[in-house]
Amino acid sequence: MRHLFLVTLLFVFSAFASAQCINFAKNVGKEQLGDYIHDGNYNGAVLEEGEKAELYKTFFSGESYRVAISKVKQLPDIHFRILDKAGNVLFDNVDYDYRLVWDFKVESTQMLIVELTVLDREGEYGDILSGCVAVMFGLEPDKKKKR
């Protein structure tokens, strides 16, 4: 009976944490898109130091996109990369001082991989930090249609 209670408690806690991250994505992450049109998906997860996550997303030919990563303040920097299906690195934020927003245009329709890694606090010991990380995608508005 005690084991069942612990499993139920763990499930409830993970569902609560997931809901909190979706709210974080809606309230904080979406702002990072600026004028870009949000794709309607809220991608958020609780990650901890050293943990890696991947998100697969199809991007369409001729469109301009913004990928925006948001994190809770207590987390260390996020290393994020965009890779094609062959594993070729198209963007690496290490080259841009761990910048969390990248704008780009896709020449051909393809599935890309957004890879996130929460960096470890180098030389610091203690409890492992964890918190919400959100990945948001936006499509550049068609400026020709606006008047």
Image (cartoon, helix red, strand yellow):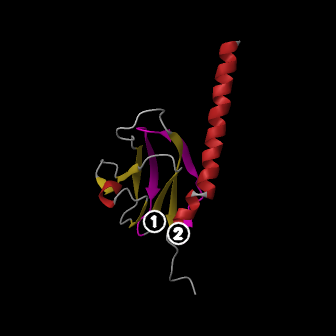
| Screen quadrant of the N terminus | top right
Residue 109's x, y, as percent?
40, 60
Q: How far from the left and from the top, in percent, is residue 95?
A: 29, 58
Depth check: give the residue in front, 87 or 31.
31
Q: Which residue is mark 1?
A: 65
The image shows residue 64, relative to residue 121, as above or below, that is: below
Examine the rendered structure and indicate whether residue 37 appears above or below residue 45: below
Please report the bounds of the magenta region as a residue range: 35-62
Q: Which residue is mark 2?
A: 36
Q: Count the marks: how many?
A: 2
Determine the CA span between mark 2 and mark 1. 8 Å
- Does the CB distance between marks 2 and 1 fall below 8 Å? yes
Secondary structure category for the residue under label 2: loop
Q: Name the secondary structure under disc 1.
A: strand
Give the mark nearer the N terminus: 2 vs 1: 2
Residue under the point 51% across and 39% down: 130
Q: The residue under label 1 is which amino acid type?
A: Tyr
Answer with the quarter of the image where residue 17 lies. Answer: top right
